[in-house]
């Protein structure tokens, strides 16, 4: 009789452990994008254009995708990419989105990917520009970019 009482309890415990393991394996992977070293170029004009740079590091277990940008310091924020054409000329073009691999990073730097802040300024050395990064599948990321004069 005792044996029968223990078997249902044991089966119940085993079912709970299996259910717990199954639920843990079925959780939805999410990107987790962190920003490092954010900075923007100074601009003297009150309606000028400048650029911002940073490292986007995805410490999550799913790819991230930057799909939108905004800042109160600029009329518009665009994602751009600079490429070198066959003749050696640098060309800059707006892109719609930027993929950030799971466990990887993407650098936004002069001569490559970067943010263009249109209708920004004046922004002086030492100021801070706040930029919101909209990421597909996760919460927006707020960035404080230090303004640097060059």
Image (cartoon, rainbow, N blue to C red):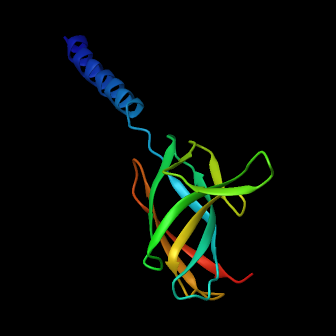
What x and y, as percent, mark residue 142?
A: 47, 68
Q: Residue at x 56, y 49 (%)?
A: 59
Q: Is residue 112 visible?
A: no
Residue 133 in the image, given as x and y percentages of width and height: 47, 62
At a point 60% along the width and 54% down the height, the residue shown is 57
- Residue 13 drawn above or below residue 29: above
Vertical relation: 47 (above or below) 111: below
Q: Please identify the quarter of the rendering in which residue 99 is found.
A: top right
The residue lying toward the viewer, choosing from 2 and 114, is 114
Which of the 4 image quadrants contains residue 30?
Answer: top left
What residue lies at 49% left-to-right and 76% top-to-bottom? Answer: 130
Quadrant the N terminus occupies: top left
Q: Is residue 145 above or below residue 78?
A: below
Front residue of 57 and 82: 82
From the top left corner, tell me how far across and down residue 48 is, in percent. 56, 81
Q: Is residue 93 visible?
A: yes
């Amino acid at each position: 009789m005792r044996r029968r009482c223990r078997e249902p309890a044991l089966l119940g415990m085993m079912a709970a452990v299996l259910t717990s393991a199954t639920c843990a394996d079925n959780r939805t992977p999410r990107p987790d994008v962190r920003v490092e070293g954010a900075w923007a170029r100074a601009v003297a004009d009150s309606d000028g254009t400048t650029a911002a740079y940073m490292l986007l590091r995805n410490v999550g277990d799913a790819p991230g995708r930057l799909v939108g940008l905004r800042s109160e310091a600029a009329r518009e924020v665009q994602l751009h990419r600079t490429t070198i054409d066959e003749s050696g000329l640098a060309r800059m073009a707006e892109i719609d989105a930027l993929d950030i691999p799971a466990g990887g990073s993407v650098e936004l730097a002069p001569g490559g990917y970067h943010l263009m802040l249109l209708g920004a300024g004046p922004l002086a050395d030492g100021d801070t520009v706040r930029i919101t990064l909209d990421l597909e599948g996760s919460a927006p990321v707020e960035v404080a970019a230090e303004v640097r004069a060059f």
